[in-house]
Amino acid sequence: MAAAPHPASEIAIVLVAAGKGLRAGGPVPKQYAPLLGRPLLAHTIEALSVLRAPIQPVIGPGDEPLFATVLDALPAEMRALCRAPVTGGDTRQASVLRGLEALGGDQPQIVLIHDGARCHPATQLLTRAIEAARAHGAAIPGLVVSDTIKQVDAQGFVAQTPERATLRAVQTPQSFTYSLILRAHQFAAKENIQNLTDDGSVAEWAGHKVHLFPGDAANLKVTEASDFATMERLMSADLTDIRTGQGYDVHAFGPGDHVWLGGVKIPHTAALVGHSDADVLLHALTDAILGALADGDIGSHFPPSDPQWKGAASDQFLRHAVSLVGKRGGKIAHLDGTLICEAPKVGPHRDAIRARIAEICDLPLHRVGVKATTSEGLGFTGRREGIAAMALATIRLPE
């Protein structure tokens, strides 16, 4: 569902992504961890981009290279919405204030403040947030609490049972008139109030009434490692445009002592001749993915007339095709390749080839198939003059 664009002076978004995400584990903060082939934060920006409003990212100290990988995973029109990131503070509250102050030159009427780890906010939720801010000045999304909540004391005993009907689980984006929430955050910072965990609490502390509007149960915050699998299942349900592309490639033998097949170096009595490393299987897979995207072929993306591709490793061609799927908000469901040759024997190398393709494409092994056959002595492959490869790619895209 596409949202109408807003004048730059009307709406702006502060995207809070300065946390370390330690509970999710992994080598990088959770907002930069892969989800459906792209950094989680790229999905968040894509969801927010339907508003066509400027996005002010707030990132952790030293996270500029990681944020650059997020931008690389987005189409140009989405990258253009992102302002230069600012560095966050020691708390979420301090990080939001820095993001709000970075918007000072724009002076938007309404600002949405959203957690980077909530990567699936629906367009309808964003629209409700804007409408609530216009009507009330300060508004937050919330869900009805279905479980009984207990307040406990320091020894772990129940101290109180709040009335469930009055409780709500709060989400983001939280929405405000810009001047209201900026002054509230500045006032709290001046008074050294640092323990407010969401922006609605900052507005409340500053004396403003905060309206609560309906949230969205699918607007989950990724916190633990297991949440990634939950989000992948949830977001995959939106990828209803299922496409299949096919690829075909052939290379002749020439002098040499090895061939590259599926990213694996295999000893042989000859080499395959080509402008790059002549990896016939990776070329066919690349064309299959490009075909499913209806986005030309390998030659249009990597012209053989360009000297920079002379002798190039073909894994970069396949990675490029995979990245294009990610930039369209999709994912690869399955890859299947067939090698046609009399020699070398592919069977002893099949598992290594599958593993290498899965690694290049960031896929689980069970989503990659590799087969081999001969042409029974017929044709150029039967005469051992070269190798041919066929490939199929199944991808899923949002409608």
Image (spheres, rainbow, N blue to C red):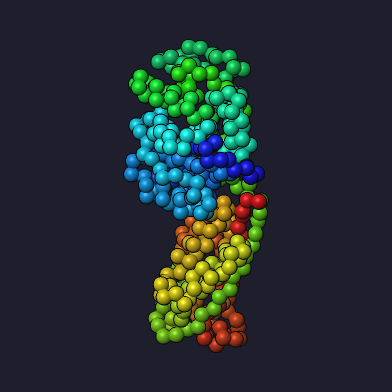
- Is residue 47 visible to us here? no
Report the residue that reaches farthest toward the bottom.
Answer: 383
Left or right, 270 with respect to 285, comes to left
Q: Position of residue 306 (x, y in %)?
A: 44, 74
Report the residue that reaches farthest toward the top.
Answer: 159
Left or right, 230 with respect to 72, comes to right
Q: Quadrant of residue 62?
A: top left
Q: Position of residue 265 (x, y in %)?
A: 42, 72
Kindly identify the residue that appears in the image at 36 percent across and 45 percent down.
63
Q: Position of residue 378 (x, y in %)?
A: 61, 86
Closest to the observer, 222 or 121? 121
Q: Position of residue 143 (x, y in %)?
A: 59, 27
Q: Quadrant of residue 184?
A: top left
Number of callouts:
0
On the rendered image, what quadrant is the N terminus found in?
A: top right
- Is residue 41 visible to us here? yes
Kindly identify the residue that appears in the image at 55 percent across and 14 percent down.
162
Above or below 274: residue 219: above
Closest to the observer, 256 or 320? 320
Kindly identify the residue that appears in the image at 52 percent across and 32 percent down.
109
Above or below 212: residue 228: below
Closest to the observer, 130 or 316? 130
Above or below 52: residue 391: below
Kindly identify the residue that appears in the image at 48 percent across and 76 percent down.
304
